[in-house]
Image (spheres, rainbow, N blue to C red):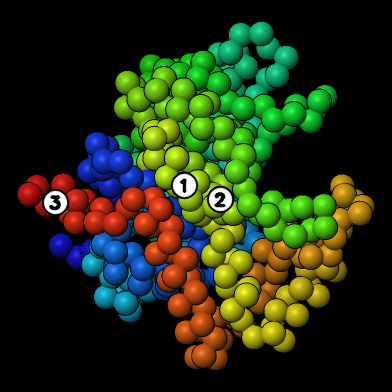
Amino acid sequence: MDYSKPVSGKQIFKALEKERCIVMAANIRVQRSARGIMQAAKELDAVILFEIAKSEVGYTGQNAKDFYDNIVKTAEDVGFDVPYAIHGDHITIKDTKPESYKGAEDLIKDELAAGFTSYAIDASHNFNINATDVKEQLKDNIEITRKLAKLIPNKYSLEVEVGEVGRTDPATGEKQLSTPEEASTFISALRSDGVQPDLLATNNGTSHGNVFDKNGNVIAKVGIDLKRTKAIADAIRPMGVRIAQHGITGTPLDFIPLLLDCGIVKGNVGTNWQNIAIDSIPLDLRKRMEEWTLSSPEAAKTKAKKPNIAENELINKNIKNSIKTFKADLASLPDEYKKKLDEATRKSAIDFINAFNAKGTGSKVKSYIEGR
């Protein structure tokens, strides 16, 4: 079998359903990052998901076909022979407007046409905080997820989301964690209409991207509520659903093994690869990207929300928006910088794969696919 092409995410998670491991899902914003991750995964025989979120499609300048073609070409270039999937991450719809639904529907169709083999529908923003009944609170999320899921063939893996990642109570500013009742109600409602998710993402105390101290320096992220995560995992496991953990960038590696006991089977790592890429490029290119970022509308919005934000934090939070503008520069780095980026990415990927206990998962998935 030709494993330079993606396999179904469903095959991956079925093959590993009894294993104590987490499959790393890597968001590829700078296209070169895929190479070092594949080198690490090949070295450790580890299954990987390569993913791109709806928001990343916009600010990285990669449509579905661009993304698919880059991953497959990289796999061919490095002689990659380990099963992997290509995942449409955070196909997000934040409200019930017809045009918002149409945007998500069009993206799913584009990803299907491109050859994606795994999908994540995120309608978690649609939550009626004023409703007293949990099912009523989740009504719009359930309906949007159900309709979009019907577009995706059952042979591909499906991830859904309950509880917007990083959501806080607007009145108190406190984190609003997903509950086992929300999770089981959400999954039960989908299953009753013939939609069977493989994975559920939740708000369990983490956040996307880096976290910072008061001086704008990146600090460790240890906000995942392990007890709540396990309670949710236990509630949905009988329904054939496992936990997808978002926002792992910045989580100390010695904390990650604790996640293995919480029913997590997929771990998203995104900003980490962007950080490595930005740290590996020529200084003059990095300065140009930073200058562009500081003058961008996105940085202005961030500063309006947090007037005293440190410049380094302002850059770190918004430099992702410069990737599309500098895509050609990032694709044509001098060889010495490509090697630097590849090696730094490879080393980090090895660390994550080992922490996720995912070494050797490639052979297990191959055996499942090939019926051995």
Q: Position of residue 358 (x, y in %)?
A: 32, 52
Nearer the viewer's eye, disc 2 or disc 3?
A: 2
Q: Residue 194, relative to residue 32: is it above or below?
A: above
Q: Amino acid at mark 2?
A: Thr
Q: Nearer the viewer, residue 194 or 19?
A: 19
How far is the residue under mark 2 from the one under mark 3?
32 Å
Q: Earlier in the sequence, mark 2 or mark 3?
A: 2
Tell me which numbered mark, 1 or 3, is placed earlier along the sequence: 1
The residue identified by callout 2 is: 251
Q: Which residue is mark 1?
A: 256
In the image, 120 versus 313, the foreground residue is 313
Whether label 2 touches label 1, CB < 8 Å: yes
Q: Is residue 156 left or right of residue 366?
A: right
Q: Is residue 309 visible?
A: yes
Q: Compared with residue 125, is residue 190 higher up or lower down, i.e. above or below?
A: above
> Residue at 42% of width from left, 45% of height from top?
257
The foreground one among 198 and 287 is 287
Is 38 on the left-hand or right-hand side of 104?
A: left
